[in-house]
Image (spheres, grey):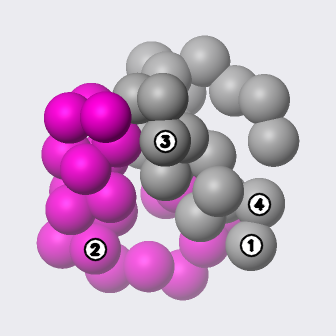
Amino acid sequence: MRLPDASVQKFLSLLTFLSSEEIEAIVQSHMKDPGSRNGQRRIAE
């Protein structure tokens, strides 16, 4: 899924049933290594 990095947290909140703690961990992981696209991968799941 191709999303701007800035939209990851918003879409994780809207499109998943993850807790806010899980979302925060994913966003932090994504910001440390944006090339891995961890946030976008979780949204696509």
Q: Residue at x 74, y 73 (%)?
A: 45
Query: Dot 4: what SS?
Result: helix
Q: Nearer the viewer, residue 36 or 5?
A: 36
Task: Indicate which disc, 3 or 2, sits on the residue closer to the N terminus.
Answer: 2
Apparent side of residue 25 relative to residue 19 in the rendered image (left or right): left
Query: What percent of the width, then of the height, locates residue 20?
Result: 26, 68
Residue 44 drawn in magenta: no
Q: Which residue is mark 4?
A: 44
- Please identify the quadrant where the N terminus is shown: top right
Query: What percent of the width, then of the height, locates residue 44?
Result: 77, 60
Amino acid carrying label 3: it is: Ser
The mark closer to the camera, 3 or 2, is 3
Q: Which residue is mark 2?
A: 22
Could you tell me if the residues under marks 4 and 3 are in contact, i.e. CB atoms within 8 Å?
no
Could you tell me if the residues under marks 3 and 2 are in contact, i.e. CB atoms within 8 Å?
no
Query: Dot 2: what SS?
Result: helix
Question: Which numbered circle lies on residue 45?
Answer: 1
Residue 16 drawn in magenta: yes
Q: Residue at x 34, y 42 (%)?
A: 30
Magenta stretch?
Answer: 12-33
Q: Which residue is mark 3?
A: 36
Amino acid carrying label 4: it is: Ala
